[in-house]
Image (cartoon, rainbow, N blue to C red):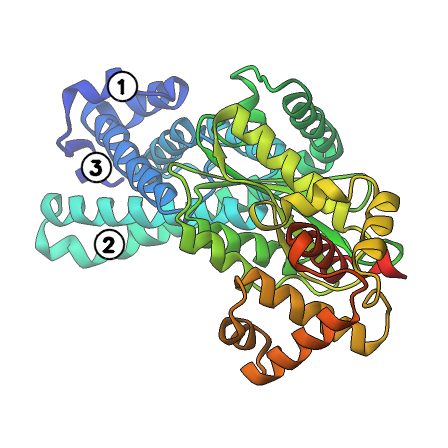
Amino acid sequence: MADWIVTIASDAGALARSQAPRAKDAALDDAGVAATGWAIETAEQVHADLLASEERGELGLTGHERPALEASVLTMLTGLVTGRPFEAPEEAVSQVRWAARQGMSLDALLRIIWRSHSGVQAALIETMTAAVPSNRLAEEVRRVSTGLLDFVAVLIDALSQIFEQESATWGRHRSATIRRAVDEIVDGGRADPSVEDLLGIRLQRYHTAAVLWPLDVGSYPGWSSDSARWTESVKESLGAGSTLVVPRTDGSTDVVWSSSAAPAPDALRALATIPLPEGFSCAFGFDAPGTTGFRHTLLAARGLARAAAGTVRSRVWFADRHGALALMMQDPGAAATFVHRTLAGIDGTGTRDVMLRETLLAFLEHQGSRTAAAEQLHVAATTVAYRVRQAESSLRQPVADRRSSVLAALALAVHFPHLLA
């Protein structure tokens, strides 16, 4: 028996703060008041460290870790005192079932367990250094460290099995439930506060949504590790604290990132540089706060994705930049007619017309600056000037009287070339 454990000093008020009463009562019988209080204090500190990591976007906590962590520390401590075999505490089992129902990955769950284990081990060894005589310290550290590893091994084995069983049972049901909850917010603009636990995000935070879709739905590769890496890279760029992933029945995936503050403009611009999963395109909505913002950003992303669905090139679309095009693409037939009529003379599908449209668009978007257009197109300014003259002379109507219409038609033609097919 580790007799030093029962002599650990602790805050007498810790027992009143317990969130795992069943494990606390068992520990009081076997380890005494002081050691039980120490375990509760340690769980509080390790949980605070987890929350700090969550603020930095390092973990995906569900909000139900505190009781599970306390029960685990109490169970571990009781096992060290009594020498009885370790078992996963009921509070930890309940937390794992909840995590599985929230769609947490097993890797994320194990990361939380190992992070907690490291924190508890550090606290226990620090306490041992003060409580155990120096002539016994090295041996006791080895014994306790072995016991901790045995406990975490039992915990991981038991909880992993429960997690897999729960995921299999609830996976499809949860996906359907989440889709319904998201669609209710999008349709009605309101949500019951309890839906936050289901979605795993806080609705009053800032949200940025995207729709990720395969260019070839017939050979849809499914949600891959590349998709997951892209989602995490976007999360890091935005400084988001949580991510909601919602697979749709048409092969696309809605993704919503939530953060405590509005993303910086540089962070939003950087999204265009994050490599997409091979064979995919994505459309980002506007960033906005609250339930209304959640609705608006997802609606914008979905509308833009619908408009861009006919494109065959993998690319990133932004509602702030391409939202007007999405509106014009609500009626593709009318958009095609508008483009052909406005760009008559350079509305062909050949290489020359494509080049002239791209050059004239860059020239007009840069307010007539040949230098800026040349930098964008990676050609000489004289080349831009020559192509602009060719485009203007080929158009059947002059640009000057209808600049805004020409600009809109060029943007449609360049971004949605299938309109000219």
The residue where tag 2 is placed is 141
Q: In the rendered image, which quarter contains the C terminus?
A: bottom right
136 to 173, vertically: above or below: below
Few, some or many residues within 10 Å of mark 3 (<14, 14–19, 20+): many
| Residue 329 shows in this picture | yes
Where is residue 55 drawn, in percent x and y? 35, 41
SS at mark 2 in the image = helix
- The one nearer the camera, 76 or 401, is 401
Alpha carbons under labels 2 and 1: distance apart = 29 Å
Which residue is drawn at the image coordinates 57% and 80% (left, top)? 378
State whether residue 69 is above or below residue 320.
above
Amino acid type assigned to the residue bearing label 2 in the image? Val
The residue lying at 9 percent from left, 55 percent from top is: 134
Disc assigned to residue 17 = 1
SS for callout 1: helix
Mark closest to the chain's N terminus, 1 or 3: 3
Q: Nearer the viewer, mark 2 or mark 1?
A: 1
Q: Seen in the image, is 242 located left or right of residue 18?
A: right
Q: Is residue 184 above or below residue 140?
A: above
Q: Which mark is residue 5?
A: 3
As shown in the figure, which amino acid type bears the numbered disc 1?
Arg
x, y (%) of residue 184?
68, 21
Q: Secondary structure at mark 3?
A: helix
Residue at the image position 62 percent from the left and 83 percent from the top: 383
**Is 36 displayed left or right of 417 in the figure?**
left
The Cα–Cα distance between marks 2 and 3, rounded to whole angstroms, is 12 Å
Between marks 1 and 3, how big is the CA–CA gap? 21 Å
Look at discs 1 and 3 and give the one toward the viewer. 1
The type of residue carrying mark 3 is Ile
Image: 12 above or below 145 = above
Q: Quadrant of residue 224?
A: bottom right
